[in-house]
Amino acid sequence: MKLTASVITILAALAFVGTAIASMPGDTAEFDGGSMGGVVFDGQVHADAGLSCDACHTDIFQMARQAEISMADHNGGNYCFSCHQDGGKAFASNDNCARCHQ
């Protein structure tokens, strides 16, 4: 009986961890993009660029899904745009909307 409870507890914990880290290399996360169309974050693309999860989490993003990212965030260099604003660290988002918005 104790073994069964332990197995159930471990399986439940693994199920939770799997959903909490849904954008690991090989996974994607999809976000509504308003009138611009949805945005797909591809963990593999970022891993292939040499980034690990802690490059963005938790300084730029919390581990949970963020609220809507606005044009004010875009223009202010917040969230994705802390790297993707001017092309200094990653491709510039300006005039490149279709690269993220589907």
Image (tube, grey):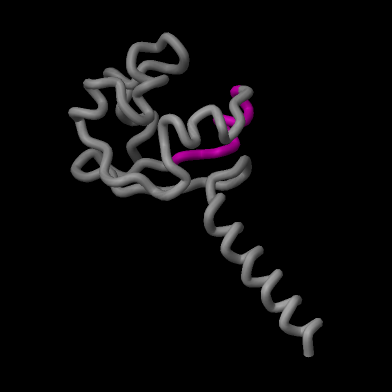
> Is 80 contained in the magenta span?
no
Which quadrant of the view contains residue 37?
top left
| Image x and y of residue 58, in percent | 47, 36
Image location of residue 20, percent across then percent down: 53, 54
Location of residue 31 with respect to 101 vertically, above or below: below
From the viewer's perspective, is 96 left or right of 40?
left
Query: Of 34 and 88, which appears nearest the observer?
Result: 88
Quarter of the image with the C terminus is top left
Q: Magenta segment, which residues?
A: 41-49
Point out the image quarter for the N terminus. Answer: bottom right
Q: Residue 27: give x, y in percent of width and height.
A: 57, 47
Left or right for 75, reference 8: left
Q: How many marks?
A: 0
**Residue 69 in picture, x, y percent from top left:** 27, 38
Q: Nearer the viewer, residue 73 or 28?
A: 73
Could you tell me which residue is drawn at 26 percent across and 26 percent down? 74
Q: In the figure, 76 relative to 6: above or below? A: above
Determine the residue positioned at 35% across, 45% down.
66
